Image: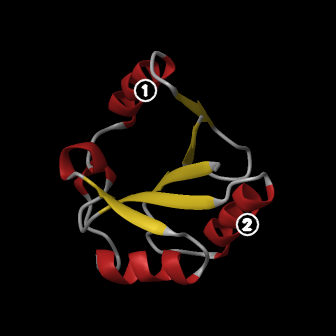
Amino acid sequence: MKIAAIIAEYNPYHNGHRLLVRQVRSAGAQAVIAVMGGDWLQRGEPALFPKRIRARAALTCGVDLVLELPLPYAAATAERRRSDREMMKQSRLTATMPSFTSGMLVSIV
């Protein structure tokens, strides 16, 4: 089974996010997991909508499972994420930055 995980804020969930989920599925993912920040997002900004509303929107639009990214990671700067990408290169995860989204797409192999 091919599983794809999308790291995003969904602040708010919009048609571009829906398109990403559809494209991930058309690329062969049988399940899609979204990892999103809770009530506080990158740079420590509050989310426009509560996390449960954003999670329900993702589930309604085709995501199979929504996981909350812990606050220290959700509120981290992009430099922190860069070091996380370097760690992923050493693990069994592969990361790509598709041109059709600003979110990071992680495929489990």
Which labelled disc corresponds to residue 82?
A: 1
Q: Can you say whether 28 is above or below 10 in the image?
A: above
Q: Residue at x 54, y 84 (%)?
A: 60
Query: Residue 20 sits in which quadrant?
Result: bottom right
Q: Earlier in the sequence, mark 2 or mark 1?
A: 2
Give the left or right position of residue 41, taking residue 93 as reference: left
Q: Residue furthest left?
A: 72
- Secondary structure beneath disc 1? helix
- Image coordinates of residue 65 in percent, x first then y, are 45, 67
Q: Residue at x 55, y 70 (%)?
A: 63
Which labelled disc corresponds to residue 71?
A: none
Disc 1 marks which amino acid? Arg
Q: Nearer the viewer, mark 2 or mark 1?
A: 2
Of residues 62 and 97, the one drawn nearer to the viewer in this rendering: 62
Q: Residue at x 67, y 67 (%)?
A: 16
Disc 2 marks which amino acid? Arg
Give the left or right position of residue 5, taking residue 82 as reference: right
Q: Residue furthest front?
A: 1
Please rate how many residues cluster around mark 2, counting C-alpha atoms within 10 Å: few if below 14, some from 14 to 19, many from 20. Answer: some
Asked whether disc 2 touches disc 1, contact meaning CB atoms under 8 Å apart, the reply is: no
| Quarter occupied by the C terminus | top right
Please rate how many residues cluster around mark 1, counting C-alpha atoms within 10 Å: few if below 14, some from 14 to 19, many from 20. Answer: few
Q: Residue furthest right?
A: 26
Of residues 75 and 51, the one drawn nearer to the viewer in this rendering: 51
- Image coordinates of residue 106 in percent, x first then y, are 55, 41
Give the left or right position of residue 99, taking residue 1 as reference: right
- Image coordinates of residue 103 in percent, x first then y, are 55, 50
Q: Residue furthest top?
A: 90
Q: How is the image coloured?
A: secondary structure
Query: Residue 88 sits in which quadrant?
Result: top left
Can you identify the residue that label 2 sits on? 22
